[in-house]
Amino acid sequence: MNKKKKAPGQSITEETKIKYLARGKQLVERFERETGKAWTQHPEELAWWLEDVKSTLMKNSFVQYKSALYYFLMENGEMNAAASIKNLTRTGCTKRSGKTSSSKRKLAPREDVVLIIEELKKSKSTHAKTLAQWLWLNLDLGMRPCERATAHEEGDILHVKNAKTTNMRGYGQTRSIDISMMTAKTDEF
C-alpha cells in the first residue's frame, strides 16, 4: 500500500510537537548517558547510536524514536544530524519483545459484555437502559472513547470523526456507519 508522504511538520498537532520535543530530550540524554558524549558536540553520532539501539526496539517504537529525534534535531538547528536520522530504516528492529501492549487483550470478550447487559436489564438504575444500549452498540461499532464524544446521528447514519487522522495515520477524517439495523437491536431494552 502506498501512503502519500507529507512534508516534515505538516499535519503535526501542537500536542505531538510537545511530545516529540520531550521524547527527543529523553533520547539525547540517554545517548549522553550511554556514550559519555555531549549530543551538542556530536549530533551526527545520534544516528549511529539509534541504529545500534533499534535491534532492541519494536518497529513502532523505533518509528516514534526516529520521529521524535528528527523533530528535536530540526528544532535545534541540527539539519545534517536530522537528515541522518530521517534516512534510517526499520530494518533490524525486533519482531516481538513480549513486553508490549501487543500481548494484552484490547477488548472485553463478547460473552462478558452480554452478561453485563443482561445484569443491566435487571437493574433499577435510571442509567441502566442507556448503558446497556451503549454497550450493545459498541460491540458492533468498535469506536474509541474519544470518537464517541464527537459522533452524531443523521437519520440512520452515524457520523464519526476518526481518532487516528493526525501525523499521517488513518484513512480519512471521518467515517459514516449505517446504524439502521443496530437501532432495531436496542429496541428490546
Image (spheres, helix red, strand yellow):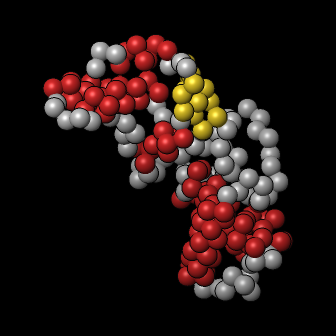
Q: Nearer the viewer, residue 141 or 152?
A: 152
Residue 31 is at least partly visible in this image = no
| Residue 20 figure quarter | bottom right
Residue 136 is at least partly visible in this image = yes
Tell me which residue sits at (79%, 58%) in the image.
8
Relative to 185, is 15 on the left or the right? Answer: right
Query: With respect to residue 39, does 14 lie above or below?
Result: above
Query: With respect to residue 180, does 108 lie above or below?
Result: below
Query: With respect to residue 156, does 142 lie above or below?
Result: below
Residue 73 rendering spot, x and y as whole percentages: 74, 72
* Callout count: 0
Q: Nearer the viewer, residue 138 or 127?
A: 127
Relative to 125, is 182 on the left or the right? Answer: right
Tell me which residue sits at (46%, 13%) in the image.
181
Q: Nearer the viewer, residue 147 or 42?
A: 147
Residue 45 rendering spot, x and y as whole percentages: 72, 75
If the image is split into quadrants, where does the N terminus sit? top right
Tell me which residue sits at (80%, 46%) in the image.
5
Query: With respect to residue 163, does 9 lie above or below?
Result: below
Relative to 47, is 118 on the left or the right? Answer: left
Residue 89 rendering spot, x and y as whole percentages: 72, 53
Q: Nearer the viewer, residue 126 or 63?
A: 126
Tell me which residue sits at (40%, 39%) in the image.
106
| Residue 50 figure quarter | bottom right
Residue 52 rendering spot, x and y as whole percentages: 63, 65
If the image is split into quadrants, where does the C terminus sit? top left
